Amino acid sequence: MFIDEVTLQVEAGRGGDGCTSFRREKYVPLGGPDGGDGGRGADIIFEVDEGLHTLLDLRYQKKIIGKKGENGKGKNKHGKSMDSVIIKVPQGTVITDMSTDLILGDLKDKNDRIIVAKGGRGGRGNASFKTAANTAPSFSEKGEPGEVRMLKIELKLLADVGLVGLPSVGKSTIISKISKAKPKIAEYHFTTLTPNLGLVKASNNQSFVMADLPGLIKGASEGVGLGDRFLRHIERTKLIVHVVDMSGNDGVDPYTAYQTINAELQAFSEKLINKPQVIVANKMDMPSSSDNLKEFKTKVKDKIFEVSAITGLGLQELVDYLAQTLTQIDNEPLYEDDKFESHVIYTFQKEQPYTISKDDDVWVISGDMVEKLFKMTNFNQEEGAYRFARKLQKLGIDDKLRELGCKDGDTVRILDFYFDFRE
């Protein structure tokens, strides 16, 4: 089954918890802290597998979670970091963060790989908090949470030439005659339901890859019919072959059909309509085709190849022309740099690392820094809870709460944790 788009949530592994431990040996009454740090959580990595041609393996996976790092132990033993989770995808896979609509990676080369979610660092053990002022800290950190992302994963086929046209214009027959591709061919619309790839060889032994796409209809760019699901597969092509049924036997005027397809290409992407395009007048073995072609040429002045996919008329000439033309076309990048997360330049402003709002009678503190600090604090350890309170004071949260009108005994919430505000 050909699957070319899935949505998937990934959650990298949480870091292992640090250990609270003290050295206990005979004749060493004050051995000091020896709690080790936790290990790093597993990263989530996407990697190209040349043997894959569909995203079927990911279709039924709603969430992928990396393993948590191993907890630290006594005697200064650090926890083991977890191996990355490797997700295999086909060449041509594009991964987009749905929360920002920015591209994390375009995996178009055979050795491409990308970390889409980084595992959390391990929490520090109490040995890491030893200072001259506090020689025996009795607290440790929990592991840092791993990154969580909602991803859109799209497959955009790697092909040099893309065949486009209305349903039943003969695209599948053409690719079956000039390559070893074996698409389904029948006398009804939408026989082709998935893209087909074929390796085509010219007279000079130059070869290129051609993609036969399911037929497009008016409104395809908006999802009508088989819609924009398949238009994405010609975004990578260097050259578009526009196949027109010149016989008009379906009651569709060839020029109207030509305009319809070009309108859908333009509506989907300006890049598509600006790609080099070769017009192929197919079914020239039919009686009405010659007259229709004469009328068509009065409106379209571009070079037109006259072919018959059934008899083979003009196919070799078309193949040789495509091969020669491809050598003269540079492969432009599919996306501009500003579409990639790694290329976006962020302008940082001097802002508070938290926000305070009120939900009925509850003061709500939010912000990445505060929430991460909260998640990495072990509130079962009294000294750890005091450290958390001191951190909030240093961030100015206590003063800000008072300024906003928070009084002694008021309820304050961070994430799902409620506590009383005390002066």
Image: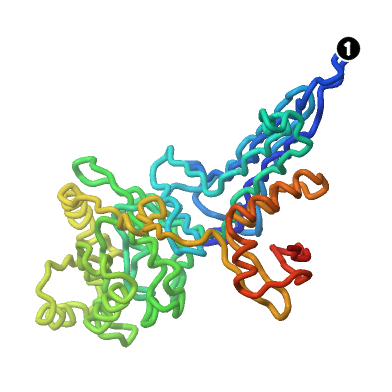
Locate residue 79: give its quadrant. top right
Callout 1: 10 Å neighbours few (<14), some, many (20+)?
A: few
- Left or right of residue 371, residue 151 in this image: left
Q: Nearer the viewer, residue 266 or 297?
A: 266
Q: Nearer the viewer, residue 263 or 246?
A: 263
Q: In the rendered image, is residue 309 in sight?
A: yes
- Left or right of residue 380, residue 149 in this image: left
| Residue reaching furthest to the bottom | 251
Q: In the rendered image, is residue 56 in sight?
A: no
For mark 1, what is the residue? 27
Tell me residue 63's x, y (percent).
66, 56
Tell me residue 247's x, y (percent).
26, 79
Q: Image point 38% across, 57% down: which residue? A: 346
| Residue reaching furthest to the right | 26
- Element marked by disc 1: loop
| Residue reaching furthest to the top | 27
Q: How many marks?
A: 1
Q: Is residue 265 above or below residue 93?
A: below
Colour mapping used in the image:
rainbow
Tell me the quadrant of the picture where the C terminus can be found: bottom right
Q: Identity of the amino acid at label 1? A: Tyr
Q: Image point 24% across, 69% down: which residue? A: 273
- Left or right of residue 295, residue 121 in this image: right
Locate residue 341: give its quadrant. bottom left
Q: Nearer the viewer, residue 272 or 130?
A: 130
Tell me residue 404's x, y (percent).
61, 74
Q: Is residue 137 above or below residue 377?
A: above
